[in-house]
Image (cartoon, rainbow, N blue to C red):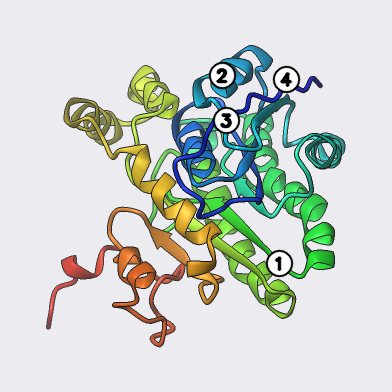
C-alpha cells in the first residue's frame, strides 16, 4: 500500500469546506468524477483503487481541494486494507466525514450454470463486502463525531433483473438493502447512508460487455452498442448527486436509493419535493415512474 503526496489547489466552492471524503474506485470513471466534484465543493479527498499508477494520475488530474487530494492503492475486498486506509486518511487529511463506496467489478458474464464459482464469489467480495468492510472501518469514527454521510453506488440490475449478470446484479441489489438497513442503525447518530443509481455511464464495464459477445447475449450487446453510440449518461450527474447527499442540504435524506437520471433529486435539494411518501427513492422501484401505465 502506498500513499501519494497531497496536491493542494484552490476550491471552486465551499459547500463541503473542511470535510474529508474517501472515494473507492476513484482512479477513473464515476469514482473520479465524484472525487473531482467533492474536491471542487471544498472537501479534502482520499482516492483509492488497486492501481497505484492510475491513482497518482487521478490525484494530479483532480488537482485537489484547499486541503488537498491524496491517493492510497489497495483492494477494498481486503478487510485489513480498509482499516489501514482509514488510518492513512486520518493521518494524511483528517478523520473522514464522507465515504463513497464506488469500487466494483462486473464479475462473470454468462448463464448461471456457466459462471465460474470463484468469479461469482469474487464479485460479492468486491461489490458487496468491500463496502461493508469500508463502513465497518469508517462508522466508529463517524459515531464519535455524531455526523457523517455514506454513499453507496448501486444500479446495474438492482432494481430489475439483468440476465447473464447474476453476480453483479445480486451484489448491487444486496448493497441497496444494506444501505437501507445501515441508515436505520445510524440515524440516531446523525449519520446518513444513501445509494445512487448512476445510470448507463460508459465505463470499462461497458467494454467488458462488448468483449463478452455471445456470453452476454444479443440483447445486452445491442444495448451496449447503442449506449456507446449515444455517449451514455454523463458521470457528472452521479457526481452532482453525490455532492448533494454529502452536504447539509441532504440532512433529512437517508436510507434512499436515488436514480441520478430518473428521480427529481434536485427537487429535494431545492425544497420543491419532500420525502413524505415513503415509497419514493427505495428498492421497490422497477422502472421510472413516468413509464408506469395507468390502468
Q: CA distance from mark 1 to mark 3?
A: 23 Å
Q: Along the polypeptide, which appears first: circle 2 or circle 1?
A: 2
Q: Along the polypeptide, which appears first: circle 3 or circle 4?
A: 4
Where does the image place residue 255, in percent across and percent down from the top left?
56, 71
CB-based contact (under 8 Å), mark 2 and mark 3: no
Q: Nearer the viewer, mark 3 or mark 4?
A: 3
**Who's the residue at 68% across and 28% down the image?**
70
**Who's the residue at 29% across and 53% down the image?**
261
Could you say whether the residue bearing mark 4 is in a helix, strand or loop?
loop
Q: CA distance from mark 1 to mark 4?
A: 27 Å
Q: Along the polypeptide, which appears first: circle 1 or circle 4?
A: 4
**Which residue is label 2 attached to?**
60
With 97 as the anchor, is 259 left or right in this view?
Answer: left
Q: Along the polypeptide, which appears first: circle 1 or circle 3?
A: 3
Residue 150 falls in image quadrant: bottom right
In the drawing, what numbered circle is on residue 4? 4
The C terminus: image quadrant: bottom left
**Which residue is label 3 attached to?**
64
Amino acid at each position: 500500500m502506498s500513499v501519494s503526496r497531497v496536491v493542494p489547489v484552490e476550491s471552486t466552492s465551499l459547500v463541503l469546506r473542511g470535510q474529508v471524503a474517501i472515494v473507492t474506485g476513484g482512479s477513473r470513471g464515476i469514482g473520479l468524477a465524484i472525487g473531482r466534484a467533492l474536491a471542487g465543493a471544498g472537501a479534502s479527498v482520499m482516492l483509492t483503487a488497486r492501481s497505484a499508477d492510475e491513482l497518482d494520475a487521478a490525484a494530479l488530474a483532480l488537482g485537489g481541494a484547499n486541503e488537498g487530494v491524496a491517493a492510497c492503492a489497495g483492494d477494498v475486498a481486503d478487510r485489513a486494507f480498509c482499516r489501514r486506509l482509514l488510518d492513512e486518511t486520518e493521518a494524511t487529511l483528517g478523520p473522514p466525514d464522507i465515504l463513497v463506496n464506488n469500487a466494483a467489478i462486473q464479475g462473470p458474464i454468462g448463464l448461471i450454470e456457466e459462471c465460474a464459482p470463484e468469479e461469482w464469489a469474487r464479485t460479492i467480495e468486491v461489490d458487496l463486502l468491500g463496502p461493508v468492510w469500508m463502513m465497518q472501518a469508517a462508522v466508529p469514527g463517524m459515531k464519535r463525531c455524531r455526523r457523517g454521510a455514506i454513499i453507496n453506488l448501486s444500479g446495474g440490475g438492482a432494481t430489475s433483473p439483468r440476465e447473464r449478470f447474476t453476480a453483479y446484479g445480486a451484489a448491487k441489489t444486496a448493497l441497496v438493502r444494506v444501505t437501507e438497513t445501515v441508515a436505520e442503525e445510524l440515524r440516531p447518530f446523525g449519520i446518513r447512508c444513501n445509494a445512487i443509481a448512476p445510470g448507463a455511464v460508459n465505463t470499462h464495464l461497458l467494454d467488458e460487455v462488448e468483449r463478452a459477445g455471445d456470453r452476454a447475449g444479443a440483447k445486452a450487446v445491442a444495448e451496449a452498442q447503442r449506449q456507446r453510440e449515444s455517449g451514455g449518461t454523463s458521470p457528472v450527474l452521479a457526481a452532482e448527486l453525490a455532492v448533494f447527499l454529502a452536504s447539509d442540504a441532504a440532512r433529512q435524506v437517508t436510507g434512499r436509493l436515488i436514480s441520478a437520471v430518473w428521480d427529481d433529486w434536485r427537487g429535494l435539494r431545492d425544497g420543491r419535493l419532500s420525502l413524505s411518501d415513503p415509497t419514493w427513492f427505495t428498492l421497490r422501484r422497477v422502472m421510472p415512474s413516468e413509464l408506469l401505465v395507468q390502468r
